[in-house]
Image (cartoon, rainbow, N blue to C red):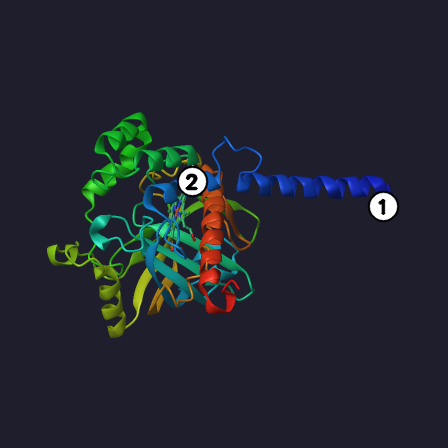
Amino acid sequence: MNRPAICVPCRLAAIAAVTACAAAAFAWTAGWLSPRRLNAPHIVNTFEANYGVHPGYRRNHAKGLCVEGQFESNGNGTQVSRAAVFAAGDTPVIGRFAIPGSNPSAPDASTPVRSMALLFRLSDGEQWRTGMNSTPVFVVRTPKQFYRQLVASKPDPATGKPAPAKLDAFFRANPETLPFRQWLKAHPPGSSFANTAFYGINAFIATDAHGNTHAVRWQMVPQTPFEPETAAQKSDPDFLAGDLEARLAQGPLRWHLVLTVAAPGDPTNDATRQWPAGREQIDAGTLVLRRATPQREGACRDVNYDPTILPDGLKPSDDPLLAARSAAYSVSFNRRTREEAARSPGNAQP
Ligand code: HEM
């Protein structure tokens, strides 16, 4: 069969148009086209303006440590996704535990939230990267609200802490933040990364082997029983790393990867709202962590846990936070790896 002829100039024009679109998307992310519109550099600049620049460190979730292990899939996840990671078998994982905030020396008890980030290296060469927090909902729904919250949190020079009146005003003006604040009030932080549950929070779209799509969220449910943070731990600024190393010296730590499947009508674009109880849950297998390393020399140091890096069988939902996260993590990653490279002796300026 003859294919319709496409004139050479038309083809070149089409290629030029595609290149121009890609360049425009990149320029938007970099903030060159719209200096007054909110973009990723504005967000990362605000982290730096609030809490200073700590060269080589992530601009958020700066304090953390690397972990390694594997995901042992039981095959159940194939009910919703054809991603190779859900076929029965093992997938190596490079992970990172952290606390949110831009200060790499912050005391662990300064925040009730913890995080787990994972990079799954699939057997077919693909990767699945995810960053999860220890709350089932996020504090805000949109990137603009995230930015406004950062501005409202700017530390008062007199106290070194956010001015309570400004934060209160932000919360009052943004009632979507209520479920997050209520959840934190009702759930004291755990005594360990090991007994903490971590939630992907944002919704994603899973595609199964038949091409059917399913909106999903995921969480890591610890096998280690929950115990609340103790008074003694609150006075040790680095208790989380010490605790994790002590536990790993006794043997591996485990979490179940549980997928929650949305029912029609459940919102996929609002990270401040949980889906109603009773949704189908699939226990897809076990995350087994065996080793921890300080982040300075660990395998997670130069990883960007961009949540939109997904294997075939998973894709981003319409949640507006996902694109903003991807863009901001990239700006933070570029700044910190440039600083890291400048520090290494082989790259010293003449
Ligand atoms: C607009 C919303 C958000 C922005 C702008 C933002 C910004 C950032 C930035 C700049 C980093 C440092 C990235 C790097 O240098 O590698 C980071 C790390 C992180 N964020 Fe977010 N974040 C957002 C929402 C979220 C949400 C909804 C979650 C939870 C689901 C989350 C979880 C994490 C985690 C776990 C890390 C640490 C990753 C690691 O250990 O390397 N963030 N965030």
Pointer 1: what residue?
Answer: 3
Task: Give the residue at the far front of this rendering.
Answer: 350
Q: In this view of the protein, can residue 10 be seen by the observer?
A: yes
Q: Is mark 2 within 8 Å of ligand 1?
A: yes
Give me the C-alpha separation between circle 1 and circle 2.
Answer: 48 Å
Q: In this view of the protein, can residue 262 be seen by the observer?
A: no
- Mark identifier at residue 270: none
Badge 2 marks a residue whose secondary structure is: helix
Q: Nearer the viewer, residue 10 or 90?
A: 10
Quadrant position of residue 273: top left
Q: Is residue 294 above or below residue 234?
A: below
Say which residue appears at 30% left-offset and 70% top-offset. 252
Q: Nearer the viewer, residue 339 or 262?
A: 339
Badge 1 marks a residue whose secondary structure is: loop
Mark 1 closeness class: few <14, some 14–19, many ≥20 residues within 10 Å:
few
Q: Amino acid at mark 2?
A: Ile
Say which residue appears at 26% left-offset and 30% top-offset. 166
Residue mark closest to the camera, 1 vs 2 = 2
Mark earlier in primary sequence (1, 2): 1
x then y, percent, for residue 60: 37, 49
Quadrant position of residue 229: bottom left
x then y, percent, for residue 29: 54, 41
Pointer 2: what residue?
Answer: 43
x then y, percent, for residue 45: 42, 42
